[in-house]
Amino acid sequence: MATESTNSSVNTNSSINTNPKDPSSPYFLNPNDGPATLLTNHLLTAENYHSWARTVRRSLRIKKKLGFIDGTFLEPSSTDALLEPWLECNDMVVTWLQNAMSLEIKNSVVYVETAHELWLELEQRFAQNNGPRIYELKQSIHNITQGDDSVSLYFSKLKSLFDELLNFELIPSCTCGAMKPVLENQQRDWMMKFLMGLNESFSNIKAQIVLLKPTPSLSEVYALVQQEEKRKQISTLPNLHDTLALATKTHYPSSRDIPKSFGSQRRDKLFCTFCKVSGHSLDKCFKANPNLEKPTCTHCHLVGHTAERCYKLHGYPPGYKLANRSREPNPSVNQISLSNQEQISEDSPAVLTKAQYQHLIALLQSHDPQPAANQVQTIAPPPVCPSPSSMSDNEEVKSFKDLGILDQLVEACNNLGWKNPSKIQAEAIPHALEGKDLIGLAQTGSGKTGAFALPILQALLDTPQAFFGCVLSPTRELAIQIAEQFEALGSVIGVKCAVLVGGVDHVQQGIALGKRPHIVVATPGRLVDHLSNTKGFSLCTLKYLVLDEADRLLNEDFEKTIDEILNAIPRERKTYLFSATMTKKVRKLQRACLRNPVKIEAASKYSTVDTLKQQYRFIPAKYKDCYLVYILTEMSGSTSMVFTRTCDSTRLLALILRNLGLRAIPISGQMSQTKRLGALNKFKAGECNILICTDVASRGLDIPSVDMVINYDIPTNSKDYIHRVGRTARAGRSGVAISLVNQYELEWYIQIEKLIGKKLPEFPAQEEEVLLLLERVTEAKRISQMKIKETGGKRKRNGGGDDGNEEIERYSDKNGKSFKKAKKR
């Protein structure tokens, strides 16, 4: 036990909160903090002590346990009431530290009792003799050059070496300014080393930077060099207006017919040493660099080149083998099409329309003879003078008011943070305000709800009545979300909504219908139940019908139910059909319920947004859990959704991640409606930052804060991939989607790449680092499986299984009454 002096030092520190039940106390243990909690992914080895120690200290400071290793919280006396909480926290910190070590080091400190003693022993073993490491760092700094790396990658490598060296050679700080010249000299040395390692192509910018006074910092120099790199990339783009008029070229059917003189002509051109093709360099070769996206020509739609280098557009080079060509050389003349509009004077009084110009060209071509070998055909299109109608069509819409939305609804949009309409909103709302039926195809997260909600609310202002509009949704969560959106947009005009979904008391929904709401948002099955059984409820006066996520509605076998609904509502109505994909069933439904619709297609058939970074990782199936934990801990602090294929997997993964100290919560179709909504609300509120879910959460849910989507199980239907990854990178934000692919899912993954039309880059991960987690992940999985087995592994009717989330029932409706209490009444 500690001495009396130790006890007095602890007791006199009155600033420390010693209440073990207070979350702000260092003696408090969070329920999510267990023995398997990871302080860092990088295990301690004989070479990485300093970086490892910095990460561990940072993690312990966050958990308010740093005092257990630096000696601030020493062991109390045997009569002190804090002894038991101190022992619990000390043992927990010792376990965390041992879990963050490699097996060899861990075995050597098994019998150390206190965290302070363990920390001191590690410091004495690994932090004393720094000479060899300093030598290695200085040698690496001396030898590093840019080489084939980008400026950004080269700077990152060099900066990490500087920072680690600074950890060994600390410069003392002072307030008198005596150390300022030392710091300036250090920054100058770093800056000079950075410039010396750059490639020779940056010699001009290096000479300019060296002459600058005062000497810029390393970060400022990096910014200047990076700007120069971008300028070089822009300047190397080909000039599309270069003309080679009056140049006679000869087509050679095969490479053996090419004269030897062509060799000297090609020496000055870019040449790739990987694919042996001229026109690009090695760093721009997509065959040598799988991470580069394959270029696609906008003229011939072939992959492998751009329109600037399209042979069909600009002519074939000498020696190119053409089909159905004579093997004799065929002299011909380059016919140049000049498109420089600057050749036409802006003061020209006569301006032709595009149609008139094309007609005139057709007449000239029909009467003029074929150009001779020494003639040059020059075609310069006149400048296009847009008519007022075309200007109004192409003019950029800057606000909702420009679309014709009333001021009250514009104010509601501003309150929601909607400053400018999205593409689907800008194209759909004007047609909807004209009273036309709509078919809207857009990517997930593009604002489809606002595209149909605003026109309906504006029409409701003109002719207010009960049961004015009805929205059909495939899932309960999406229905509730749509209703919340309607109420938020209609808050300034007093709109009332009723939500009809399964899993909630039928009587309470009947009471809500008795209040005659303006908008009904429902799942098809529950709506039919109320139409058949709720007295006085009818949609015979309905003016607007919306089928949201129509492809999902039909995939869920709601076809017969939707037919019943269509027979129960008036034919004289406006119908909006919105979907992410246009399937055969959706086309069939379109013909049945829409009249002369306007099709708004704001995206390609199957596509993802440009702000989404998509990656994959091919792994053995037995290591999939390890890779999942590795990614989640690497992206710690991010809000993530993990998609699995089965409900049982969501429960098991949530328990595994919780046992490892991660804040995960499951959601699946087997959970009760109350628990599903409760789990979703906890995720939205940030109480849990990892949502383990099935495809029930892949459609329609708008959670703007989702940073990352992980496909733990690859979807068997490749179209479901589009909807899964659509949960992130919404409303212009950026996001990451990572797919874990094992040997049994490769065929499904290939179908996904074919669907989206591009090959995804591989997620970078060091397999050695991942496998260091295997022991802890396996133990956490064993404990989780035992817990599920102890509860019988049964899916409870009222909760969807024991997932350890009793508190997720705290879901309240707009009146402040929980669904659970309403159900009991």
Image: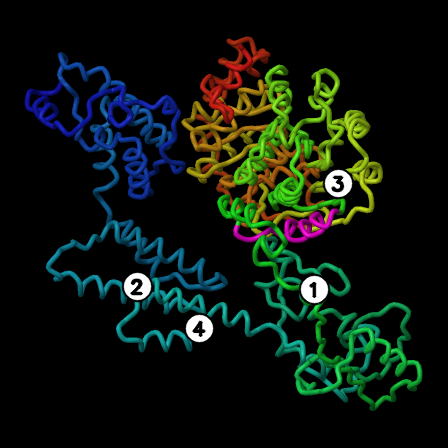
Tell me which label, 2 or 1, sits earlier in the chain: 2
**Closer-to-camera residue (821/806):** 821
Q: How many residues crowd around disc 3 within 10 Å: few (fewer than 14), some, or many (20 or more)? A: many
Q: Quadrant of residue 9?
A: top left
Local SS, label 2: helix
Write the start and end of the magenta stretch as one range: 419-435
What is the crowding at mark 4: few (fewer than 14 residues within 10 Å), some, or many (at least 20)?
Answer: some
**Residue position marked by numbered label 4 in the rendering:** 202
Q: Which residue is mark 3?
A: 574
Disc 3 to disc 4, C-alpha distance = 63 Å
Name the mark nearer the viewer: 3 or 2: 3
Indicate which disc residue 305 carries.
Answer: 1
Disc 2 to disc 1, C-alpha distance: 41 Å
> On the image, numbered disc 2 is attached to which residue?
190
Report how far apart the C-alphas of labels 3 and 2 lie in the structure: 68 Å
Instruction: Determine the CA span between mark 1 and mark 4.
Output: 28 Å
- Callout 2 amino acid: Trp
